[in-house]
Amino acid sequence: YQVNHTLFRPISCSGNSKPYSDTIFVYQQKGGFLKSTYYGGNSIERHLSGLVADDGAINMSYHEINKNCELMTGILQV
């Protein structure tokens, strides 16, 4: 399963997340390792890193600093 150089835009989020339709995620993948930068929305500095399983399941963690200078961190499963 490959998402290398794929662009994504969130369409919905659950829990504490605040989706911004102008946020774009740019993924880079090397084997089972995945990383992403993203831009737009309320964030000024952000990164994702994760692992891709053979069945395409993705487990990631993220950290970002928003425009209010708050540090946000979390775990995502796709």
Image: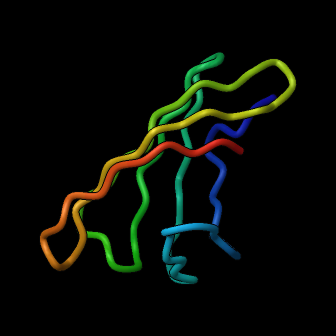
Q: Quadrant of the C terminus?
A: top right
Q: Position of residue 57 (x, y in %)?
A: 77, 32
Residue 76 location in percent, x, y? 57, 45
In-front residue for pair 31/78: 78
Whether residue 48 is situated above or below residue 66 in the rendered picture? above
Residue 45, how many percent across, how many down? 24, 59
What colour scheme has been applied to the protein in the rendered image? rainbow
Q: Position of residue 66 (x, y in %)?
A: 24, 70
Image quarter (top left, top right, bottom left or bottom right) of the N terminus: top right
Tell me which residue sits at (55%, 31%) in the image.
Answer: 34
Q: Residue furthest front?
A: 15
Q: Quadrant of residue 46?
A: bottom left
View extreme (left): residue: 69
Q: Of all residues shown, which one is farthest toward the bottom?
A: 21
Number of marks: 0
Q: Which of these two is toward me, 35 or 55?
A: 55
Is residue 65 shown left or right of residue 29? left
Rendered residue at 48%/36% (across/down)? 35
Residue 41 drawn above or below residue 9: below
- Dividing the picture into quadrants, the one containing residue 10 is bottom right
In the picture, measured across the screen, residue 22 lies left or right of residue 51, that is left
